[in-house]
Amino acid sequence: MDYNSGGGGPNELHNNQFYQCEESKPLLGEMSEGNNNTKLGAGPCRRSLHHCSSSGMRYKLLHEGDIQVCVVKHPRTFLSKLLTSKYLRRWEPHHLTLTDSGLSSATPTGYMETTLSYSSIEDLQLLSWDNAPKYCIQLSIPGGTILLQAANSYLRDQWFHSLQWKKKIYKYRKVLNNPSRWDVVLKEIRALVDMALTSPLQDESIHQAPLHIISTLLAENSNLSAQDHENIIVAIAPLLENNHPPPDLCEFFCKHCRERPRSMVVIEVFTPVVQRILKHNMDFGKCPRLRLFTQEYILALNELNGGMEVVKKFIHSMHGPTGQCPHPRVLPNLVAVCLAAIYSCYEEFINSRDNSPSLKEIRNGCQQQNDRKPPMPLRLLRPEPPTPPPSTILPLSSAPQPSPPANPATPSIPISSPTPCLPLSPPPSIVNSSEILVELERNNNTTNAKRKGGPAGGDSEPNLIDCLLVSPAVNTLSIQLPAQADRVLGCFALILKMLSDYDDWRPALASLLQPIPFPKEALAHAKFTKELKYVIQRFAEDPRQEVHSCLLSVRSGKDGWFQLYSPGGVACDDDGELFASMVHILMGSCYKTKKFLLSLAENKLGPCMLLALRGNQTMVEILCLMLEYNIIENKDTQLQIISTLQSTQVGFRMYEQLCDRQRELKELQRKGGPTRLTLPSKSTDADLARLLSSGSFGNLENLSLAFTNVTSACAEQLIKLPSLKQLNLWSTQFGDAGLRLLSEHLACLQVLNLCETPVTDAGLLALSSMKSLCSLNMNSTKLTADTYEDLKAKLPNLKDVDVRYTEAW
């Protein structure tokens, strides 16, 4: 043990004076009255403190550690003075733990047999007299002194600051636990905040501990005036600049937003707090009150004079002035807040449906069945659908049609079966919060089962859209919300619309909304689906595949936005304009496939024919593709589609072009011609089309397009070659869209060379349906290891594979 001096230099003396000055700062009742009327002696201390905070050493808060302990009793006799001399002192090694209330040892023996309470420590300072032991801290207690000796000066200072912090927090916790005068309490809170901000300790609890103390104080004293609320919020604002408020404090902030939404505190103090939450929060599930506070803050902004304009400015401030938002967590956090707010609007409906505890009951701890109010009666308020008059549904042949130009090659064919029309809608049903339409009658379940072809009494729950598409009457269902819930719905629906206006946010927003994360009652609410229609329209107008592909269902067997907003869907309130827009964008990308057309033919053939009959060019193109790809097998349906196409000018023209292509296809596929063909380098898609239209290629088995300039567009020509078995696309611009088309039409293809092409996993995965492939070259493509493993598992005949210079290599 080293008892030599060495801590008595000028720096040590300066630190000792500083620590004594800091320790002598007043607590409750000892502070001066005004903020600027501080005691004269406190000036240098405050300056030294800020100097230490800004440019001094930083330390991690200690919770436990090894240190040497010595207890020196106050000498009263000559013998005791002799026994306490420095030559006869006994030092004990201890592993000390700094708890919330005191200092305890892992081995409670000797000097540390009992826990040393912070309240019993009268003074805390560094030893600085001559010949004092090195690296020692002096703790003054009644009747003596405790010396703590560390291994070096840094550890000594770390122990000193940690003990000082624990002691002061213990004092503030006791003082603010039983407040008497609130004007003095406010000063103590300011002193506590100042202490946390200027502490040389760096630890999350340094700022969190004062916030928890203040939140406990506010929770136990709920009868404070509004002015006291604002004063406390302003006092703790500096702590919230880099820290999330704890749950109890969030509850207090929510109350302030609800009761005083026009307070300047909402704008000046809460705005940076909410901005930090949205930028840095990773999971609202761990602290749902952060989400609730953000929700209440946005609603408070909506109550200002500017209303939604203020909300728009706030959303714009969160995105930033550039084209790309620099904070990736802002969008998912905003969407989570919007979804929670929208759910809260229909909370009473949802809880009445499943008799589950409401959010308010969960917050109040009322989760037991006998603690909750009995469920409200559920009954279905739906008028009987009126019987349409005979004149409302006309056969296609009797509907008014423009006179097409004469064309002897394609005579008009009379159709006997009627064209499916959009269902007529009865008057809307108004459902109040006391009479909630949430549960379907048994006969409706039977109807669902008959539509699906399954048993009527099955236990499986129908999917989302089936619950709402029971009858045409449900489509026009209108839920009447309370006025406050209606304002909340309008506010957060507008935020979703604003989010969809930012190009960089739209892909992630589409992905988040693809599973339709809304309650069934919201999807049956005409006002909500009308507000959300703008968002879906923005998705349908976006040319990026990652955006508009989210219009489709997230998985097979589950409906998506495409189904909801198509004619006959629960959210469709127009004559199919949005549906046509969605089909147009999907067909314009890589979804011009048999699978998509088969889905339309099975589920939406009626709306497609009706829109084509009204001259919609996208639907006319859809019907022509169904005929060209032999999607429709029923002869009567084929004739009905032909009659629909011939009933308009644009349809008649496109049907003529289809007939011409079919004649050319027959000539192309006629047996004869070469078995091998190689195009010259630099050839284009137009050159290939011109070549294939010049004769018969029914025998063509090997085609090489290597080092040409062809793209995915040439796939339209390649799928016309029925005997093609080997295809070389080396060093071309053939991409994913072309691969998707090849995979559905060239089932006999055996050899495919994609070396140095821009294909990715999105297109390569489509090759898993080409079971005849035995040789596949993916050298120098964007193939990943997972896709390669998937292809090997799904292509049993694949023997020769080249994956060099890819991730799977």
Image (cartoon, helix red, strand yellow):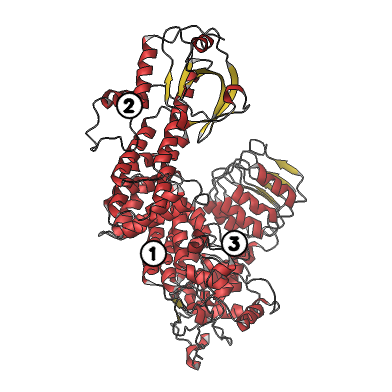
The residue closer to the viewer here, 791 or 755, is 791
User: Rounded to the nearest whole Å, what is the CA distance between mark 3 and mark 2?
Assistant: 70 Å
Q: Earlier in the sequence, mark 3 or mark 2?
A: 2
Question: At label 3, which amino acid type do we have?
Answer: Thr
Q: Is residue 543 visible?
A: no
Question: Which quarter of the figure is the C terminus placed in?
Answer: top right
- Tell me where residue 350 appears, x and y as whole percent: 52, 69
Residue under label 3:
593
Q: Nearer the viewer, mark 3 or mark 2?
A: 2
Question: Which quarter of the figure is the N terminus placed in?
Answer: top right
Question: At label 2, which amino acid type do we have?
Answer: His
Residue under the point 50% across and 77% down: 436
Q: Earlier in the sequence, mark 1 or mark 2?
A: 2
Whether pointer 3 and pointer 2 mark residues with C-beta atoms closer than 8 Å, the reply is: no
- Tell me where residue 62 appears, x and y as whole percent: 51, 28
Relative vertical location of residue 305 with respect to residue 354 in this rendering, above or below: above
Relative vertical location of residue 483 with respect to residue 248 in this rendering, above or below: below
Q: Earlier in the sequence, mark 3 or mark 1?
A: 1
Question: At label 1, which amino acid type do we have?
Answer: Val
Residue under label 2:
50
- Tell me where residue 757 appears, x and y as whole percent: 59, 43
